[in-house]
Image: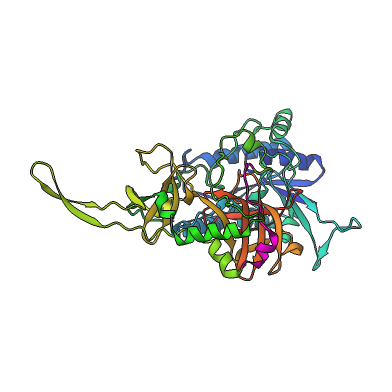
Amino acid sequence: MKVCIGLSGGVDSSVAALLLKQQGYDVFAMFMQNWHDADATLHGDCEWEEDRFVAELVARKVGIPFYFVDLSKEYRQRVVDYMFNEYSAGRTPNPDVLCNREIKFDAFFEAARRLGADMVATGHYCRRAPLLDDSGAQVVIDGQPQWRILEGIDPNKDQSYFLCQLTQDQLGKALFPIGHLTKPEVREIARIADLPSADKKDSQGICFVGKVDLPTFLKQKLTPKEGDVVEVYDAFYEGNGQYSFVHDTLASLLETPGEPLMITDYSSEDSGGAAFNNRRISTATAANIFDEIKLASLGDEDWMRLSEPYDYSGISFETETYRSGKKHVRKVRYKDNPWGKIVGRHDGAQFYTIGQRKGLNIGGHKDSIFVISTDVERNIIYVGEGHTHKGLSCCCIRIAPEDIHWIRTDLGMKDGEIRRYRVRVRYRQPLQDAWLVKRPNGLFILFDAPQRGISSGQFAAWYSPDGEMIGSGVY
């Protein structure tokens, strides 16, 4: 069998190539260039050239043919343009998920197939396994053998989330040679084999673009426009119709009557430590226990409303004139508003995402300031102070019917079905316990514990208890 390894110049794909060669596959390597414009990158315009040079050295060391392919046109059309469109609409896309679905396992495979490849392989930390029936035979649906995607063995490096949009057809042509290894083991294999990439640092940033200053990158197509930054006070939620609805609805769904948990526990997903190293385990110390029968009785409209974000457009500011100084100079100021205050200016709401705290440049607060909502049409950013701000937490999200993707097509949910899964709403997040409720107007994910910084446009992926990724969807 002829296999094309996507060789990036990094240690992971290098070891994947080595293992395939040792396992007896007819292997060749292909380096793909997907990006030319280096104006927004932070490491200069020669980074991809250096990666290609290392990749070619690795191929020579392993003893496999090396090819180069330029997929920059496809990448711009199918990934970068999508990014710009999503950000301009006020959503936060995940280009890495799109890159895998549209480029690595589509456009790249087609290029590899023209060179005779039967399959493509990558250095992802995840595992592929056949779906077996009770007799041990591989399940076949409509003439196509069925496959499973499992988390990588290394909980600190599992990358299955990035593959959450792959189809059975794509999985049938994919290999993940290092999914059974940990990162230290991969490094050690590379050192023993004296691979040129053994000590090369992992790449960061947008898939195939590199580490970028995101606002600078987006400004290539999105025009900056100054607008207000509005801080939302806790008083806004007192008597707010949507907040009261969410509170009362969650309370009505509890197994035992009581006060629902609506504010997330805070734990950093970027600082390492126990929370990061146990990514298969939810870090929530408190959670809601919902009654499945009550979930089933909730109406479609109520589910829809439960998943809707808070609307801050009602926070408006009136001006008043006053006289200041010895000369009583006439000036204009905003009247006090108990719900919020204009605390700064920004250069475009489309450049910010929910949960963001860097780049706001707002001082005078005891705790950190976070973006809790963006209004692209009115060009307003809404922020809140502290990790426990009510606007930063979310209990329920909705995936529209057309955006639901089942990796395991045999497990697709029918209207009215309710299941328990573990869900990840972004990379580097511990799996979260949740109920999935399928209705005609979408798939609703109700988390046991409130989630922090939920931003539309991202992907939610759900897993079975044994670590198999079952499906995904953009919310």
Residue 219 visible, this angle: no
Q: Is residue 414 above or below residue 259?
A: below
Residue closer to the observer: 336 or 50: 336
Residue 237, located in which quarter of the rendered image? bottom left
Residue 398, located in which quarter of the rendered image? bottom right
Q: Residue furthest bottom?
A: 440
Q: Is residue 424 magenta?
A: no
Q: Is residue 142 above or below residue 161?
A: below
Q: Is residue 183 above or below residue 456?
A: above
Residue closer to the observer: 4 or 236: 236
Residue 239, located in which quarter of the rendered image? bottom left
Q: Is residue 268 left or right of residue 198?
A: left
Residue closer to the observer: 237 or 10: 237
Q: Main secondary structure of the magenta part?
A: loop
Q: Residue furthest right?
A: 135
Q: Residue furthest left?
A: 327
In percent of width and height, residue 447 lies at 62, 53
Residue closer to the observer: 37 or 472: 472
Residue 296 visible, this angle: yes
In percent of width and height, residue 43 lies at 48, 38
The way the protein has been coloured in the rendering is rainbow
In percent of width and height, residue 465 lies at 75, 49
In percent of width and height, residue 32 lies at 60, 49
Q: Is residue 292 magenta?
A: yes
Q: Is residue 331 left or right of residue 373?
A: left
Q: How many marks?
A: 0
Q: Is residue 399 left or right of residue 24?
A: left
Residue shown at the point (82%, 43%) measured from the top left: 24
Range shown magenta = 283-298
Quadrant in which the C terminus is drawn: bottom right
